[in-house]
Image (tube, helix red, strand yellow):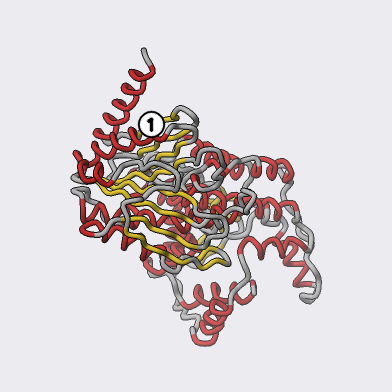
Amino acid sequence: MSTAAADSALMERVLRGYREGAHVRLRLPGGGVLNIDRKLPYLLVHRQPPGRADDGTGRLVMGEASYLLTQEMRDDEASAIVRAIAEAGTAELGSFLVLEVWSGDDGSEQFVIHGPAGAAAESVDALARGLDGFRAGPFTTETVVRTTDDRHPPARPPLLTAQECWQIGCLLIGLEVPPLYRSADGTVYPVFARRMRALLSPVLRQAAFEFARVQTTASFESYRALGPRSFGSTLFEIDRELAEIERSYQFLLLVTPVNSREAWIRFRDAGYDYEPDFHYRLLPVDPDVLKRRLYALDLEDVADPAMAFLLRDKRDELDRQVTMLAERGTPDFRLASMRLYKPVDDTLLAAARDILDTVPHGLGPDTGGAVTAEDFARLARAEIEHYRAVWPEVAADVQVRPDLVGLMVSRGDLLIGERLSLRPARVDALLHHEVGTHVLTWYNGLAQPLRQLHAGLADYDELQEGLAVFSEYLADGLDGLRMRTLAARVVAAH
């Protein structure tokens, strides 16, 4: 097959996938990439300048759902691809937006929008509004709008001429971005570049949404619906590795002393003037090995900025957890804990003290004796069976353990300290707290393709516990004593 015939067959495959709404991702000759997530009314384009590096600029569009990046591809080849996709998009959706992005001169702090006047000006306006007051680190940029038919980088031919856009029925906008993300010698500042990409992404989607809303038959509820739905295998490989690292240890069990009761008795008998000597379970992992695995993950390969942020946040949280495991029994453990969970802030502390000052314990007479650990375990298993009837994958175990105080959910299992003794009025509330929230969230997350949704995204604990206590309230179990207990824990932690 000739090169021309191969190129023709390739484009036909691309266009067929576009018309069918399929995800199309192709490596192009010369190192370029064409990615179209589904049938969308826009395409972002970045052409690598000939003869010089333009490091960092292409990554500004790589997290979007529809983009073309060229490396060594000839301009006429890139134009042919853009024209074919624009024609298909116009035929399918009534019109199509091509937005070409390139970098301005070194030292520039201006976004320059090159666009048309007339009926399509609202898309330019949406882009300008999004960029107005754009702040990235120490920079506050300016935005300039130029009404022109020249909407392409300097010294490059246009992807589509104004006449071709009119014939096709599409809109072409050029966006010149200030290269704040690299130095004059071309060195990219990776952390700052990630930040700038994250800030620019919603602006680009808002402009595309405004165009789609006014000029096309496509229907989207929000600009957020224009983000990618297909993330590629790299994201899921990193997600899986993070989840496996977290599953290699049970954090809550490993930072919970096994001698809490004995340590409390010695502390009390010494007149509360004795520093407890806590004993912990042996570590089943080497913290150094875990940290090497964490930082061997190449998160730069995750193109979508939102997903890269979530995974990077999770990696940082696991790093802090592993640090805590390594520092158990040392003064640094508390400092590591404050890095992970943050100190109690003034607003929360004031609310806790207000509760202690104003809320009576509110206890009425309890009927029946205390509910033991075995009693609660039996009720918890019945509650789990209720959920298993709805979703058979719920396979939570309930364990009564001698090395634990109180209640804990770890990896979807309910762990109960064998000395547990509950007021009967607290049982329903705790079932909804531990099983109806923590256990159920774990198994709901297991049903999702992203493993972080059962392992827990970074800083999820605050939301989890908030939902769990709210469940107690809905079950009419958030009485005065419980509120005072929660408030006292805040004051004690402070």
Q: Residue furthest front?
A: 155
User: Measured along the vertical axis of the image, is residue 279 above or below residue 481?
Assistant: above
Res 423 seen here: yes
Q: How many marks?
A: 1
Q: Is residue 116 left or right of residue 144?
A: left
| Residue 362 % position (x, y) | 46, 80
Q: Is residue 277 left or right of residue 440?
A: right
Query: 109 or 69, which is in the foreground?
Result: 109
| Residue 338 % position (x, y) | 66, 65
| Residue 4 % position (x, y) | 35, 20
Residue under the image location 49 percent in, 40 percent down: 48
Query: 432 or 123, which is in the foreground?
Result: 123
Query: 429 or 418, which is in the foreground?
Result: 429
- What residue sits right under mark 1 in the picture? 77
Res 378 seen here: no
Q: Is residue 461 left or right of residue 334?
A: left
User: Measured along the vertical axis of the image, is residue 273 above or below residue 69?
Assistant: below
| Residue 204 % position (x, y) | 38, 54
Residue under the image location 20 percent in, 42 percent down: 167
Q: Residue furthest bottom?
A: 358
Q: Bin the neighbour count of mark 1 within 10 Å (Cα to Cα): few under 14, some 14-19, many 20 and up.
A: few
Residue under the image location 45 percent in, 72 percent down: 366
Query: 414 or 41, which is in the foreground?
Result: 41
- The quarter in which the N terminus is drawn is top left
Secondary structure of residue under mark 1: helix
**Type of amino acid under label 1:** Glu
